[in-house]
Structures are given as structure tokens and as C-alpha cells.
Image (spheres, helix red, strand yellow):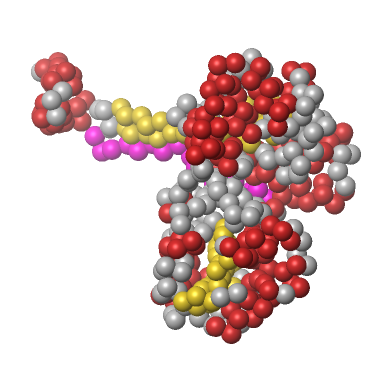
Amino acid sequence: MKIVAASDVDALAGLYAAGWDPPENVRTGVAAIVADVRASGDAALLEYTRRFDDPSASLASLRVEIPDARAAAELVPAEIAEGLRLARERVAAFHAAQLSADLDVVDADGTRSALLLRPLGAVGAYVPGGTASYPSSVIMTAVPAKVAGVPRLVVVTPPGRDGRIGPAVLFACSLCGVDELYAAGGAQAIAALAFGTASIARVDKIVGPGNVWVTEAKRQVFGLCGIDGLAGPSEVLVIADSKANPEFVAGELLAQAEHDPLARVAAVSEDRRLLERVAQLLAGPFASEAGRNEIVARVLAERTYLVHARNRTETLGVVERFAPEHLSIQTREPRSWLPDIARAGAIFLGAETPVAAGDYIAGSNHVLPTSGAARFASGLHTADFQRTMSVVENSPARMRHDARLLAALASFEGLPAHARTARLRLESAK
């Protein structure tokens, strides 16, 4: 595997490629599905569910009963239940710590300015499914919503060919207080959440990861409802020095590579010998022993970058340009890098903190910005499930003081009726 210089921007163009840009067939295909669900509601939702997921889907099978706590606990192995409970507990604690209070400011003249926080009324969480089960995605989307006070939380997830939802997802929905669960996935489920159908009432915001069709559907319905972002393939960048364990570095690259054949994985170091050892590991049995070999092999061949930097400045330049979803810092003093890093979805410090901890039980959220979106977007957090309202209450003294300037500014911008509202109050006070 080739090691490239951090200064070779052309060789790293694929690493730095950013933005949401799905193929045209995905754009047009999603547009057709969204329009169909908007026009035909449940009929279209069921048609696509039968076509892509469960051939026997019906209105009766669309809404899935969420088992009570006792019944849910019997659905999964004890160790999995223990792990999901721990994840829920830690995610709840970390996201509760993010809660803010209403802001109320009183000026010297008695004028009050406030910022009120209110939970969203209804949120839809997309949980990938079908051939696999992702209970962790339930926890990462449902728990912060409930911490924020969202009264109606809906989960949609594609059923298997047998029409069933994975037992671990059912357990997670019960554990996290999900209000409604529907066996529907893909762009059609996103459209149903956005527009509403006879069976699924519309929501205010849609969150959660999905494939390219799901993400493009979220983009197309944005504006009718909110979304958390446009999540592309997984990414990781590892900063490593001469003391880093090469297996730990290579392990992080392989862990993200197994997510998606379009994943982008990279390591940057000033120590070329470390990069050479990582390259050897990725070319040998260490890589093939990781599993999911076909997906991993494609990422290693097409979207893996080992970057040699001459100094700390060049290393930081790679971070800045990539803006990775996950940043693993495996150096002598990993915390010393934090003041210089502004663009990453989530940061994992030290050799004892694998990215997988954040995926499951660290307490942080694994719904993170990708494709360079860490330049302007953040990972899912409690505030994503709230909105704010500003409140202003002028004192009489403030209004008398401001009226002349308020009227002048409004008149300057060509809004005479605005200006008059200020003058009326000034005249009334005489």
C-alpha cells in the first residue's frame, strides 16, 4: 500500500472530496418514490415495502407492537441486553448534561429579552434494518429525543423478507420509550414521515442514518420538516506517532472500512516506519481476519490513505481538509491536540479509546457528520430535538429612547409601515 506525502494534495484528492452528490438515478428514483407516497399515502408505502422488503406487507403489519419491558428482555441474549442497557444509561446521562435552561435577561431600564427552549412535538427516527439489526441506532436517536422532552417519537425500520423486525431493535425500542414503531424503510418511509399517511402521522423532524436512498429522501423532504443532516459513507482519520501501536491504528481503519465499500479511511503520522508497519498489516492476514472481507478489500484498494507528514502543521492540515467523521488520536499526549482541531465529528483520545466505544457505549452519539460536513455541522445532540423562541418586552423608557432610530432604520429600508409603528408609540407617550 502506497504512502503519500501530506503535501501531495493531488494524491489526496479522494480523501478531501466533500459534499453530498448521489448519482442521478438515485435523485430521480427518490423523487418518484417521494411524489408517489405524497399522492397515494399508505397504498404507495405498502407497494414499495412489498417490492423492496416484505412481499406480504399489509396495513395490519405496518404498525408493530412494542413489547413491554419484561417481554422485551426475553427477546435477546442476556449479554446483549446488558450492553444495550449500559448504552442507554450512558447516552441518557451524557445527553441530559447537555440540556440548557431558558435564558432571561433584564436590562437596567426594565426591558426583558428571553430565549425559550421547547421540545419538538414529533420526531421520526430512521433505523437501518432488513438483513441486519441496529439497536444501537435506536438508542442514539431515541434517548436524546426523550431526554429533550419530545412527546411523540416514531421509529421506522425496514422489515426482513419475513416481515419481522429484529428482536434487538424491538428490545431497544421498549428500553428507550419509543412511542410508535413501523415496519417500513427506504425513501418511502422518509416520505411517509414527512407528508404523513392515514397510518403514520407526519413528524416535525427526521433523524438517523440510512443508505444513499434514505439520505437523498431526507434531502428532498427538508423544508417540509427538519432533518439532522446528510450522512454519507463512514470515515476515520488516525493521528499516530512513533509510540502508537500499529495494530491499533490498522484496526481502526479496518473497523470503519467494514461499514461500507465507499468508506474513506486514513492514518497520518510523522513516523514513516509506523506507516510502513500499518501498510504491512493491511496487506496481510491481520486485515483478512477482521471479517467482511469483500467490503474491506474494496476500501483498502480504493479509499485508504497512509499519509506521511513532515511536522505537526502538516498533520493538522490533513485534519482540516478532511474534516473526518471520526478522529482517533493515538499519540503520547493526545489531549494536547484538541486546541488546534476544529473540524471533526467526534474525537477519540488515546490508545484505550477505540472509535467503536463511541458507536455503542461511551455515551456520545454515533450519528455524525460525514463527507466534509464537519466543517459546518455537528453530531446529533440534545439541542437537535429542541427549538428556541426569542421573547422581547420593551420598557416604556426603552421604547421612547428607540422610537426615533427605529423609525429611521425602517424608513431607510423602504418599510414605511414599520416606521409608523415606532412613531405611533412615540406620539402616544407624549
Q: Quadrant of residue 36?
A: top right
Q: Is residue 410 above or below residue 384?
A: above
Q: Is residue 159 above or below residue 83?
A: above
Q: Is residue 363 above or below residue 9?
A: above
Q: Residue 42: x percent and y percent?
A: 65, 18
Q: Which residues are magenta?
A: 90-109
Identified at 58% across, 38% down, the residue is 213
Q: Residue 73: x percent and y percent?
A: 86, 39
Membership of 106 in magenta stretch: yes
The answer to whether residue 376 of the structure is visible from this angle is: yes
Quadrant where the N terminus sits is: bottom right
Identified at 45% across, 54% down, the residue is 18
Q: Residue 125: x percent and y percent?
A: 62, 35
Identified at 64% across, 34% down, the residue is 186
**Towards the viewer: 353 or 318:** 318
Residue that lies at the very extreme toward the front in this rendered image: 25
